[in-house]
Image: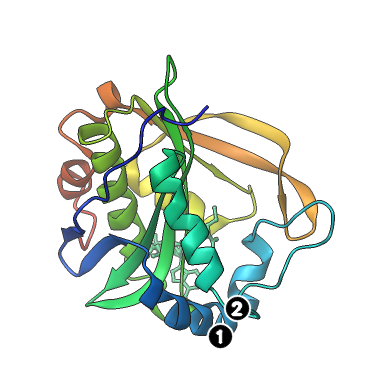
């Protein structure tokens, strides 16, 4: 069940060198180039269709994808951001599985290009997104599910201090098979003064 109302496009969210902005048509070409260049870096962690009909990211125009992603705002079903560092698009952060009603929850997924990995971009981007989802959309809970093998992504939720909730077996079809995922959550009450403030309190660089 989506949120039950259209989502107004948020203004860009910024902290230090990192910016989150809703994806738009002009991102299609740079994103395609970035996805194509990062095949080896991303493939292991990418969602695939169980039918085997997945299109290799970066191999086709992203324009229809960008349109479809933007439709999520009107449908109240998701918020598709690009991640920017120093004004350049370096990845994507997607808010999906938006549920309204008695749940008020969402999931977050993300990737950044290998050439900016290890600079603390993703923890800041995720903090900006969670703070927006709680403060502006009024959500109650955000979750991030990660393959147990993905040490870099597990570090992201560790830096953010998300609460480990448990393992979901064969949960998402990733890189051609159903994969177990470790799920991490934060509720609005747990977030207190916010995730960006939490990163700053913890001395995480870039926040
Ligand atoms: C997971 C990912 C988003 C982390 O983003 P990031 O902006 O690099 O995050 P951070 O800078 O906080 O780095 C997190 C950890 O990655 C690891 N790391 C750093 N540089 C790295 C590099 N060049 N290559 C691989 N791992 C690296 C380190 O363990 C780091 O933790 P540390 O800061 O304690 O050393 C990024 O690695 C990525 O896009 N990976 C491929 C796609 C993916 O896994 N998406 C998530 C699916 S759940």
Q: In front: 200, or 106?
A: 106
Residue at point 22% right, 61% down? Answer: 205
Q: Which residue is mark 2?
A: 58
**Residue 166 shown left or right of residue 172 in the figure:** left
| Disc 2 residue crowd, few under 14, some 14–19, many 20+, Cα 10 Å | some
Residue at point 81% right, 62% down? Answer: 53
Q: Please tell me whether mark 2 sits on a helix, a strand or a loop.
A: loop
| Disc 1 residue crowd, few under 14, some 14–19, many 20+, Cα 10 Å | some
Q: Which residue is mark 1?
A: 37
Q: In front: 56, or 73?
A: 73
Residue 75, x across and y down, in percent: 45, 40
User: Alpha-carbon distance for marks 1 and 2?
Assistant: 8 Å
Residue 145, x across and y down, in percent: 55, 42
**Residue 61 shown left or right of residue 118 in the figure:** right
Residue 206, x across and y down, in percent: 21, 63
* Residue 184 visible, this orientation: yes
Residue at point 51% right, 85% down? Answer: 33
Q: Are marks 1 and 2 in contact (CB under 8 Å)?
A: yes
Which numbered circle lies on residue 103?
Answer: none
* Residue 157 visible, this orientation: no
Quarter of the image for residue 87 reads bottom left
The image shows residue 161, relative to residue 110, as above or below, that is: above
The image shows residue 62, relative to residue 47, as above or below, that is: below
Q: In front: 94, or 100?
A: 100
**Residue 195 shown left or right of residue 51 in the figure:** left
Residue at point 27% right, 28% down? Answer: 138
**Residue 93 shown left or right of residue 165 in the figure:** left
Marker count (numbered): 2
Q: Please tell me whether mark 1 sits on a helix, a strand or a loop.
A: helix
The image shows residue 164, relative to residue 153, as above or below, that is: above
- Which quarter shows the C terminus? bottom left
């Amino acid at each position: 069940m989506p949120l039950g109302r259209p989502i107004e496009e948020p203004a860009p969210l910024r902290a230090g060198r990192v910016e989150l902005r809703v994806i738009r048509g002009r991102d299609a070409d740079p994103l395609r180039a970035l996805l194509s260049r990062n095949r080896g870096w991303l493939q292991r962690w990418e969602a695939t269709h169980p039918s085997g009909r997945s299109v290799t990211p970066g191999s086709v125009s992203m324009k229809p994808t960008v349109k479809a992603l933007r439709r999520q705002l009107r449908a109240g079903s998701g918020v598709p951001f690009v991640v920017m560092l120093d004004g350049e698009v370096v990845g994507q952060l997607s808010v999906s599985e938006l549920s309204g009603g008695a749940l008020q929850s969402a999931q977050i997924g993300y990737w950044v290009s290998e050439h900016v990995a290890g600079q603390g971009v993703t923890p800041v981007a995720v903090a900006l997104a969670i703070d927006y989802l709680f403060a502006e959309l009024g959500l109650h809970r955000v979750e991030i599910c990660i393959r147990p093998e993905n040490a870099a992504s597990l570090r992201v939720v560790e830096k953010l201090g998300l609460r480990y909730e448990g393992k979901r077996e064969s949960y998402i079809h990733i890189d051609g098979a159903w994969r177990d995922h470790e799920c991490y959550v934060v509720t609005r009450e747990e977030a207190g003064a916010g995730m960006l403030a939490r990163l700053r309190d913890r001395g995480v660089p870039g926040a």
